[in-house]
Image (cartoon, rainbow, N blue to C red):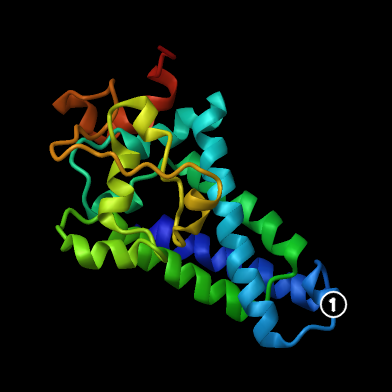
């Protein structure tokens, strides 16, 4: 929790301050109102996160570390911070590059990190939301019902619903799947034993993973 929700977001803030002070990135070299820069940065950072998430499922090296997040067979709010340290580092490097290339304002990065953290925790909670409310919410943000499919033990279902905060990217890029059964099996097809829940086994999952 300390690494995922404190150190890494603070690093993103530092990168944003550096980019602004050195006038690096697209937005730092365009004469746009501040509110436009904030909105554009927020949207593009979230889009970049969606694309990186998809790549993490298709790239064999990235998947080895990302699967630690997916091997949880009891998805709840704690799953939102269940990430391998190497994945956290790679993700931070990716977001740093995006922030510098965009020249994202510090206020936009702060707002996005807070928003993404809240939505990530919310989307992993094991709570039931009335379908009428969920249908409205999932038009804008990732809800638990929306994200549940992404944690299915069936690979075809896992490779869907990649959005991190804003749900629009799955609709836009045709990766949205709403066919989740009522009693969906969560986790992965492998690493399902009780012993695999221990911290030493979690840390070594990327090494022990054998591609099916």
Could you tell whether 87 is left or right of 143 in the image?
A: right
Give the x, y percent position of residue 32. Answer: 78, 83
**Residue 173, visible in the rendered structure:** yes
- The residue lying toward the viewer, choosing from 194 and 155, is 155
- The residue lying toward the viewer, choosing from 77 and 55, is 55
- Mark 1: give few (<14), some (14-19) or many (20+) Cα within 10 Å: few
Q: Quadrant of residue 195?
A: top left
**Residue 204, visible in the rendered structure:** no
Residue plotted at (46% across, 33% down): 65
Q: Quadrant of residue 16?
A: bottom right
Q: Quadrant of the C terminus?
A: top left
Q: Is residue 122 above or below residue 198?
A: below
Q: Is residue 49 above or below residue 90?
A: below
Q: Is residue 86 above or below residue 153?
A: below
Q: Which residue position is annotated with label 1?
A: 30
Residue plotted at (28% across, 21% down): 189
Residue plotted at (15% across, 58% down): 127
Give the x, y percent position of residue 91. Answer: 55, 48
Give the x, y percent position of residue 47. Answer: 59, 56
Give the x, y percent position of residue 46. Answer: 55, 60
- The residue lying toward the viewer, choosing from 164 and 18, is 164
Q: Is residue 74 above or below residue 25?
A: above
Tag 1 secondary structure: loop
Number of numbered discs visible in the structure rendering: 1
Could you tell whether 195 is left or right of 148 in the image?
A: left
Q: Quadrant of the N terminus?
A: bottom left
């Amino acid at each position: 929790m300390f690494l995922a929700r404190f150190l890494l977001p603070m690093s993103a803030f530092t990168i944003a301050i550096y980019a602004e002070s050195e006038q690096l990135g697209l937005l730092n070299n365009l004469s746009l109102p501040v509110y436009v820069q904030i909105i554009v940065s927020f949207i593009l950072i979230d889009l970049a996160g969606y694309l990186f998430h998809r790549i993490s499922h298709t790239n064999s090296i990235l998947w080895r570390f990302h699967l630690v997040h997916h091997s949880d067979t009891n998805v709840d709010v704690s799953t939102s911070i269940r990430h391998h340290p190497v994945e956290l580092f790679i993700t931070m490097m990716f977001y740093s590059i995006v922030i510098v290339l965009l020249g994202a304002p510090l206020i936009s990065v702060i707002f996005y990190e807070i928003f993404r953290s809240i939505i990530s925790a919310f989307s992993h909670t094991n709570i039931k939301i009335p379908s009428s409310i969920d249908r409205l919410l999932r038009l804008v943000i990732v809800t638990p019902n929306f994200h549940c499919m992404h944690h299915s033990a069936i690979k075809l279902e896992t490779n869907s619903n990649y959005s991190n905060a804003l749900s629009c990217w799955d609709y836009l890029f045709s990766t949205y799947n709403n066919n989740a059964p009522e009693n969906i099996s969560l986790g992965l097809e492998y690493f399902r034993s009780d012993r695999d829940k221990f911290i030493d086994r979690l840390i070594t999952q990327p090494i022990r993973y054998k591609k099916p």
